[in-house]
Image (cartoon, rainbow, N blue to C red):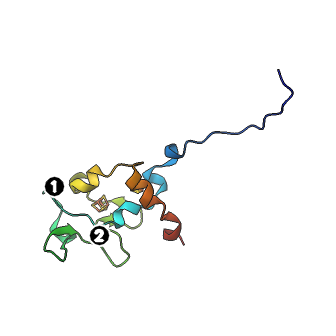
Amino acid sequence: MSNERHIPHTQLNEQAQVTCSTCAACCCQLEVMLITDTGVPERFIDSDDWGGEVMRRLDDGWCAALDRDTMRCTIYEVRPLICREFEMGSPECLEERSGIDTIYR
Ligand code: SF4
Ligand code: SF4
């Protein structure tokens, strides 16, 4: 056994820290196209420059269906397909989360 001293440390897996509960719903600022009908209420639907249906966003940049207090989706059960397929911890998610510092400025 060597006399080398080991400094205790914890190996943190960065991926393990990625969770929506420590996020600011960063991905809910993205443009969400409605490519299938999942039952999103009309009041949350807007049209883009090409006439396609998208989730409406408010002046703060976030989706109109996001609860600003809890930062949770208020239409989770009928959320668009794109939202269902956006995977927590995916490269796209990590890319969006990288902007979290500027959200809480
Ligand atoms: S960016 Fe990722 S961690 Fe943040 S809310 Fe979206 S899926 Fe969750
Ligand atoms: S519908 Fe819900 S999950 Fe999708 S962008 Fe809006 S708030 Fe986020």
Q: Nearer the viewer, residue 89 or 43?
A: 89
Q: Quadrant of the N terminus?
A: top right
Q: Quadrant of ligand 2?
A: bottom left
Please identify the quarter of the rendering in which residue 79 is found: bottom left
Q: Quadrant of the C terminus?
A: bottom right
Classify 10 Å Cα crowding around label 1: few (below 14), some (14-19), many (20 and above): few
Tag 1 residue: 38
Q: Position of residue 57 (x, y in %)?
A: 29, 72
Q: Secondary structure at mark 2?
A: loop
Residue at screen point 32% across, 52% down: 86
Image position of 26 with respect to 13: above or below:
below
Q: Secondary structure at mark 1?
A: loop
Please identify the quarter of the rendering in which residue 48 is found: bottom left
Residue at screen point 43% across, 52% down: 20
Q: Name, please, the residue furthest toward the top.
A: 1
Residue at screen point 21% across, 64% down: 33
Residue 64's disc is 2
Q: Amino acid at mark 1?
A: Thr
Q: Nearer the viewer, residue 14 or 41?
A: 14
Q: Amino acid at mark 2?
A: Ala
Residue 49's disc is none
Residue 71 shows in this picture: no
| Marks 1 and 2, how far apart at CA | 16 Å
Taking the image as shown, residue 16 lies to the left or right of residue 4, namely left
Q: Position of residue 52 (x, y in %)?
A: 14, 69
Q: Position of residue 19 (x, y in %)?
A: 45, 49
Classify 10 Å Cα crowding around label 2: few (below 14), some (14-19), many (20 and above): many
Taking the image as shown, residue 82 lies to the left or right of residue 21, namely left
In the image, the residue with mark 2 has its CB under 8 Å from the nearest atom of ligand 2: yes
Residue 88 shows in this picture: yes
